[in-house]
């Protein structure tokens, strides 16, 4: 009987010929919900451009001349038609360019990712494939068929492929329900935003090796 952290490795034909062991310290840890929330919020904040900008009354073109004399008109005194109360005037306390990024230590990011992967594995939503296509020619149809053999139709899938695996990248890059990342780009948000996480065997080996090196530092 395979152990609790054994996952079947599916071939390009959809068959499961063998199993692969997943390390406990990466795929079998307690999910820390507040930590994962903090890391996801920080990641989404860092993705904001922060280029929003409105003009103050001093930056709006025109309005240098007093619109009418100070006294004798019966109206309130005005110094410029570019004051905030006029149409076309400046904006009071409007947004200005800013940096939304939050400082998140690497160990926090790594712990949140381990918790997210462990949660997905505990629900049977982590799969491993030896490859998506037989041969060296990309074929989207064959790659989608491999996913369909293990995953329910319509599910959002995160595929983790090795950076040098051009066949997988080219086969799946245009599939709407599939998001492809390299093992060093794997992050908490994309894991939680996907229904299933599918590793290629090459990417899984690289990811586990990378995680072991980071843990030893």
Image (tube, grey):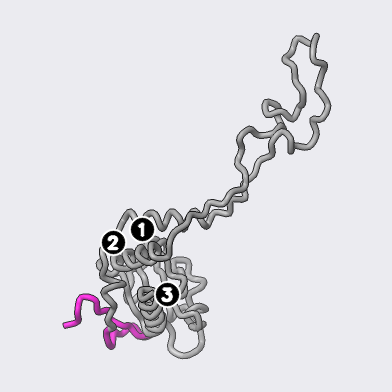
Q: Which mark is residue 160?
A: 3
Residue beneath the point at 32% across and 75% down: 127
Marks 1 and 3, the one that precedes in the sequence: 1
Q: Which residue is mark 2?
A: 31
Residue with the most extreme bottom position? 135
Residue stretch rendered in magenta on the structure: 1-19
Do tag 1 and tag 3 residues touch (Cβ < 8 Å)?
Answer: no
Do tag 2 and tag 1 residues touch (Cβ < 8 Å)?
Answer: yes
Asked whether residue 127 is drawn in magenta, I would say: no
Relative to 198, 7 lies left or right: left
Q: Which mark is residue 95?
A: none
Q: Is residue 24 above or below residue 95?
A: below
Q: Nearer the viewer, residue 144 or 191?
A: 191
Q: Where the N terminus falls, by quadrant?
A: bottom left
Marks 2 and 3, the one that precedes in the sequence: 2
Q: Nearer the viewer, residue 68 or 151?
A: 68
Task: Nearest to the eye among marks 1 and 3: give it.
Answer: 1
Residue with the most extreme front position? 217
Marks 2 and 1, the one that precedes in the sequence: 2
Residue beneath the point at 24% across and 76% down: 5
Residue 189 placement: quadrant: bottom left
Disc 1 packing (10 Å; few <14; some 14–19; many ≥20): many
Task: Residue 146: tell me if it is visible.
Answer: no
Mark 1 secondary-structure assignment: helix
Q: Nearer the viewer, residue 151 or 93?
A: 93
Task: Nearest to the eye among marks 2 and 3: give it.
Answer: 2
Task: Residue 201: tell me if it is visible.
Answer: yes
Mark 3 secondary-structure assignment: strand
């Amino acid at each position: 009987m395979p152990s609790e952290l054994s996952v079947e490795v599916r071939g390009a034909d959809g068959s499961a010929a063998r199993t692969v062991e997943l390390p406990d310290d990466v795929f079998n840890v307690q999910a820390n919900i507040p930590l994962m929330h903090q890391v996801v919020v920080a990641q989404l904040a860092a993705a904001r451009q922060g280029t929003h900008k409105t003009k103050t009354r001093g930056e709006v073109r025109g309005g240098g001349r007093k619109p009418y004399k100070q006294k004798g008109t019966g109206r309130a005194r005005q110094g410029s038609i570019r004051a905030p109360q006029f149409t076309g005037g400046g904006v009071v306390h409007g947004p200005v360019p800013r940096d939304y990024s939050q400082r998140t230590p690497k160990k926090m990011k790594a712990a949140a990712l381990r918790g997210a992967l462990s949660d997905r594995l505990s629900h049977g939503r982590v799969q491993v494939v030896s490859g998506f296509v037989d041969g060296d020619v990309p074929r989207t149809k064959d790659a989608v068929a491999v996913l369909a053999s293990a995953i329910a139709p319509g599910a959002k899938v995160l595929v983790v492929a090795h950076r040098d695996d051009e066949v997988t990248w080219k086969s799946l890059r245009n599939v709407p329900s599939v998001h492809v990342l390299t093992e060093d780009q794997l992050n908490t948000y994309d894991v939680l935003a996907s229904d299933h996480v599918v590793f290629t065997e090459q990417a899984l080996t690289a990811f586990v090796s990378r995680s072991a090196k980071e843990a030893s530092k």
